[in-house]
Image (cartoon, rainbow, N blue to C red):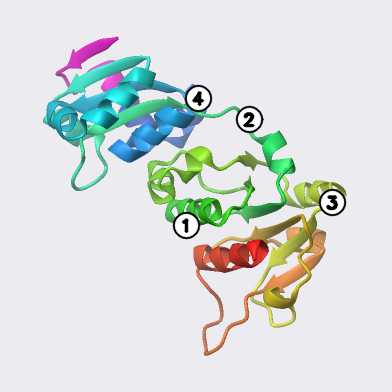
Amino acid sequence: MQTVLTAKSNDKIKQAVRLRDSAKARREEGLFFLEGARLCADAASSVGTVRLFYTARAKEKYSDEVDFIASKAEESCEISDEIAQKLSDTFSPQGIFCVCKTLDKKHYIDKIYSSAKLVALENIQDPANLGAIIRTAEALGIGGAVLCGCCDVYNPKTQRAAMGSMLRMPFVCVSDMPEAMKELENKGYVTLSSTPSEAAEDITKTDLGEKTVCVIGNEGNGVEEATMQSCMHRVRVPMQGRAESLNASMAAAIIMWELMR
């Protein structure tokens, strides 16, 4: 179904803004908001697209993407440039937006627990860090992610930083990371906790095993002590110079590289 929306006060526009700005709304409605031709096309390929919004200019410039997303969407809405500005949280919007369905929490569990290499993220609060880690994980071939206490995966900033990887990478959200690590250990995984401590094992010299999962902790506080205690090994990235630690996404990239190497 195709419609034309001209008023910023339209209920569909209000809903899109609400989903863009509110994690609570996203949880309650089971929907999330995306912006940009590539991200919306990725969503159309991998999750249910409820509604597409596009400007006439976007339709002309990104005709293939708009046609593809429209073919997957339940409804397509042409909007004015003024409404596009209201929907956008970027400086130069492309004029393509969509509302999509969030994934069922159990959607990826079987895929994750059959993967050889996993990353576990605990209390990552920066959407850009979370998105960057998931993007790197997909690029390196990590099989899935276990998330605990992290910022909303459906936050537009997370999705933008992930560049579509968050829509493809299998992930599961858990409420107790130590319990999750014990469950994975029982399934044959070597469980690692990252830390900058000099007392930890050098990740480049650790016997990682065929099935391995490593926990990356909060940007400021690292991995929680209870989680660290639940893991079989504590590992560190060897560093030179005077730097005491690495950015969470950079540390995760190096550790995931070692897991796959």
Q: x, y percentage for residue 150?
A: 56, 49
Residue at image mark 3: 188
How far is disc 2 from disc 4 in space, using C-alphas? 14 Å
Q: Which of the two marks, 2 or 1, is nearer to us in this view?
A: 2
Residue at image mark 4? 30
Choose the circle earlier in sequence order: 1 or 4: 4
Callout 3 crowding tier (Cα within 10 Å): few <14, some 14–19, many ≥20: some
Looking at the picture, does residue 9 appear above or below residue 45?
A: above
Three-letter residue code for mark 4? Gly
Looking at the image, which residue is at 69% across and 54% down? 117
Q: Horizontal and vertical percent for residue 204?
A: 68, 76
Amino acid type for the residue under numbered disc 3: Gly
Give yes or no for contact between labels 3 and 2 (Cβ–Cβ under 8 Å): no
Mark 4 packing: few (<14 Cα in 10 Å), some, or many (20+)?
some
> Mark 3 vs mark 2: which is more N-terminal?
2
In the displayed structure image, the side of residue 88 where residue 71 appears, left or right:
right
Residue at figure coordinates x 64%, y 67% from the top left = 258
The amino acid beneath tag 2 is His
Q: Which mark is residue 129?
A: 1
Expressed as whole percent of the image width and height from the top left, the position of residue 8 reads: 18, 23
